[in-house]
Image (cartoon, coloured by chain):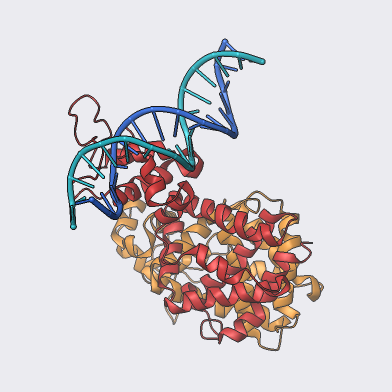
Chain colours: A red, B orange, C blue, D cyan
DNA sequence: GTCTATACAACGATAGAC
DNA sequence: GTCTATCGTTGTATAGAC
């Protein structure tokens, strides 16, 4: 057995030893299917990545049926984002900031990140950066999250040419802003007003989104 | 001078020491101890971060007494900064990249960071980011290091107006590039050629250096 | 009784073996 | 080409909580 799933409390081999609770119907109170799926998903996604992990395997590790993924999360995508345990809902934020003039999207993106991160005091961001810098598995999950959500559903809608390069470039500026303002706390950027930061940063994001890349 | 093999500071000498030629005390084999401590410190800080690494453990790995850390570096903090400064000598790099057309300085800076970080495989950068995100003291040291070297001796010479803001903005783009390319390893930026990365990133750095900020 | 969490079967798509 | 295995997903019947 692989080392990751070996740490899981309930091994996924119920078939022969004991019939167990493979019955239909609502499970007796105490067995939390949703949490079991989340825990199994974190282990599987971390070990095998998004593509390598399978819904069936996750459900097997969790000891439930694969259909429970759809029932509780809506699909593999949603289970993946849920397993990241992000403090905010990226889908909602995307829907909030996407409509409007595409030539001012850089402003809205920069302002949104400032608002979100300032509101949380930068703590979750620092924790995320630390986790990503410490665990390669976390880095891969974050990378695949950015590719899947930010790229496919966001940059692609605005920048048809070279969308992945544009998405990565946007990530450099946004992540770098977070590093300097909340991790390094380098002045005067750490204490600057949102408007001033947006005025300086947003043109860069805008160029990465819709401008010339060289 | 080779900027990569940094000029190492000499061991501390008594304040009333005569000019350079005079040697006090024993010297045999001292440099080996210092190098061993640096190598062990790099490994320990990279693996456990600033807080997790211990002076005793570093000295043990180096095969010397823990008091040698104080003797050669002055303490754990100084040893940490020394282990960070080791892969690149900022003074030499500054002298190497500063002369030339100021309007193409962004290109030279971006290319320099790419060359330095790629040469090291990104390892020291990842270790630095991890330590900075883990330990506030490490963030403070790095912040003061950036302020002192990058700001006072570099940006100030090129951008007289709002030099600290320009320095912080440059840091966002350079650090963000490092995060995406070496920590997150987000494609296509993680595998892109230097020329392509410079073409996309350098205009941003150039604007932060000499362009309008809003 | 209603509601719903659950298990099972099956579907279309896809990738690889032969 | 066909065959097979496996993927994500959907429909549906049912057992248990309410």
Which residue sits at x=75%, y=80%?
A: B210
**Could you tell me which residue is drawn at 42 percent across and 50 percent down?**
A79
Taking A19 as reference, is B69 left or right? right
Residue for point 34% across, 65% down: B51
**A100 lies left or right of A24:** right
Q: Nearer the viewer, residue B197 or B100?
A: B197
Q: Position of residue B59 (x, y in %)?
A: 33, 57
Q: Position of residue B29 (x, y in %)?
A: 42, 55
Residue lying at the far bottom of the rendered structure: B161
- How many numbered discs? 0
**Left or right: A20 as drawn, with respect to A181:** left
Above or below, D4 against A69 in this view is above
Query: On screen, C10 above or below B95?
Result: above
> Does residue B38 appear in this view?
no
What residue is rendered at 70% in x and 62% in y?
A158
Residue A1 is at least partly visible in this image: yes
In the depicted view, which residue is nearer to us: B91 or A125? Answer: A125
Q: Give coordinates of residue A114: x percent, y percent.
A: 53, 77
Q: In the image, residue A102 lies at what x, y percent?
A: 71, 70
Q: Quadrant of the N terminus of chain A?
A: top left
Drawn side of residue B142 relative to residue A206, left or right: left
Picture quarter with the C terminus of chain A: bottom right
């Amino acid at each position: 057995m692989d080392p990751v799933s070996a740490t899981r409390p309930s091994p996924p081999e119920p078939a022969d030893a004991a019939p167990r609770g493979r019955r239909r119907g609502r499970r007796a109170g105490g067995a939390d299917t949703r949490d079991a799926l989340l825990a199994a998903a974190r282990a599987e996604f971390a070990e095998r990545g998004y593509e390598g992990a399978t819904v069936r395997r996750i459900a097997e590790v969790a000891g439930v049926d694969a259909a429970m993924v759809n029932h509780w999360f809506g699909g593999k995508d949603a289970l993946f984002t849920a397993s990241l345990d992000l403090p905010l809902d990226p889908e909602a934020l995307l829907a909030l900031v996407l409509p409007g003039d595409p030539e001012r999207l850089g402003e809205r993106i920069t302002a949104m990140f400032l608002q979100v991160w300032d509101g949380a005091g930068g703590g979750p961001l620092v924790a995320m950066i630390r986790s990503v810098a410490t665990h390669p598995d976390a880095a891969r999950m974050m990378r695949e999250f950015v590719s899947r959500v930010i790229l496919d559903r966001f940059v692609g809608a605005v920048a048809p040419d070279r969308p992945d390069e544009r998405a990565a470039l946007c990530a450099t500026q946004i992540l770098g802003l977070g590093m300097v303002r909340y991790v390094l706390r380098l002045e005067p950027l750490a204490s600057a007003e949102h408007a001033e930061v947006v005025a300086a940063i947003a043109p860069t994001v805008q160029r990465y989104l819709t401008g010339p890349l060289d």
